[in-house]
Image (tube, rainbow, N blue to C red):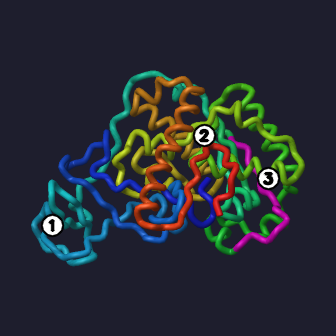
Amino acid sequence: MEPPSVKVNDLDRSSAPAGSRMQDRSAKIFRRTDQREAFSPDSCGRSRDETAGRPLNVINKFAGRCGKCGQRVAAGAGQALRIGGGWSSFHDACAPVQTAPPVRNHRGWHDMPVVGFDIEGTDPEPQDTRIVTAALVYADGTARTWLIDPGVPIPAGATAIHGITDEMVRDAGASPREALAELGIEIAKLIADSTPLVAFCAHYDVTALHTELARHGLPAVEWERAIIVDPSILHAEVEPRWTNRRQLGDLCGFYEVELATAHDAVSDAKAAAGMAVSIAARHERIALMRPDDLHRAQVTWYAEQKRDLQAYYDKQGRDVSVSLEWPLETKRRR
């Protein structure tokens, strides 16, 4: 889950995405996004606005001639692409389209059952958030869902993201202790069966659930035994030169995965599982890793990715501290 407010992506300021294909192979797309979102700490790519899942326009700051059709592109009306050593303007309809590498025929862990996991909560800080809805989506398409009355008011900003209101949880929500106990037991069963649990930006979901279980005096999940797959980490690993947004909806489009309703726990959990499978199907080195080895590798990859982000913030002189812990954060973010 991406928390309410912002979980900010690792910023990558490199050139063209490695391993991807473009209609114009020399084009390097530099997308200009909302600066508050793009430069917030620890992004995991969950959009906090209505743009998730829709194509994102690249803003051309200056007017110019379209690099494809030759017609004039007014300032702010098209896209700016870096081609070779210079910049070119394109109409939206003329701009090169970035696509993922093709699906291969190799075998791997993605042929095995995985379970998607997502929560939605009240706060962007995982150690402060109260879970209001959660979902587990199984490989056969079935799902278990929980609507939870957190016992505290749901901030308007959080409701604007996931749509869960105080009235909804008062009328139909289960008590936190009851619902979280059930969720903890279900996840414990998956861990005991060595079933990979897939969550987009898993550090938020894992930390939030771990904290909530402790808050209500419930048994802790043995996260140290879990096999967790985080497609946000996998994407950053296989596309190290990625320059576009890393929102769940944007990446679903890239990997040809359906996201029915952004920030709905079932939709997000299903999309996360689908994305992990899609990445493995396109990248043999990811697919051939043993699931437990993949989990350990993600611990390393995540730390490396976040060190790069920390270095960027340090270079900018910004007082931001990025967590290197995954999947369970033990230190507060703020």
Identify the mark at residue 82; answer none if there is no mark. none
Which amino acid lies under the numbered mark 3 shown in the image of this protein? Glu
Question: In the image, is residue 74 above or below residue 122?
Answer: below
Spot occupied by residue 54 in the image (x, y as percentages of width and height): 43, 61
- The location of residue 195, given as percent across then percent down, is 66, 29
The circle drawn on residue 212 is 3
* Nearer the observer, 92 or 294: 294
Q: Label 2 is placed on what type of residue? A: Val
The first of marks 3 and 1 along the sequence is: 1
Question: Identity of the amino acid at label 1?
Answer: Cys
Q: Which residue is drawn at 42% across and 58% down?
A: 312
Q: Residue at x 54, y 54 (%)?
A: 260
User: What mark, if any, has residue 66 been given in the picture?
Assistant: 1
Picture quadrant of residue 155: bottom right
Of labels 3 and 2, earlier in sequence is 2
Dot 2: few (<14), some (14–19), or many (≥20) neighbours within 10 Å?
many
Q: Which marked residue is nearer to the observer: mark 3 or mark 2?
A: 3
Give the side of residue 240 with respect to residue 263, left or right. left
User: Which segment is the magenta one?
Assistant: 143-155
Element under label 1?
loop
Q: Quadrant of residue 295?
A: top right
At x 30%, y 50%, the residue is: 98
Crowding at dot 1, Cα within 10 Å, few <14 / some 14-19 / many 20+, comes out as many
Task: In the displayed orientation, state which residue is furthest to the left.
Answer: 70
Q: Is residue 195 left or right of residue 9?
A: right
Q: Is residue 147 magenta?
A: yes
Determine which residue is flagged by label 2. Answer: 198
Closer to the camera in the image, 42 or 260:
42
Which type of secondary structure does the marked residue at label 3 adopt?
helix
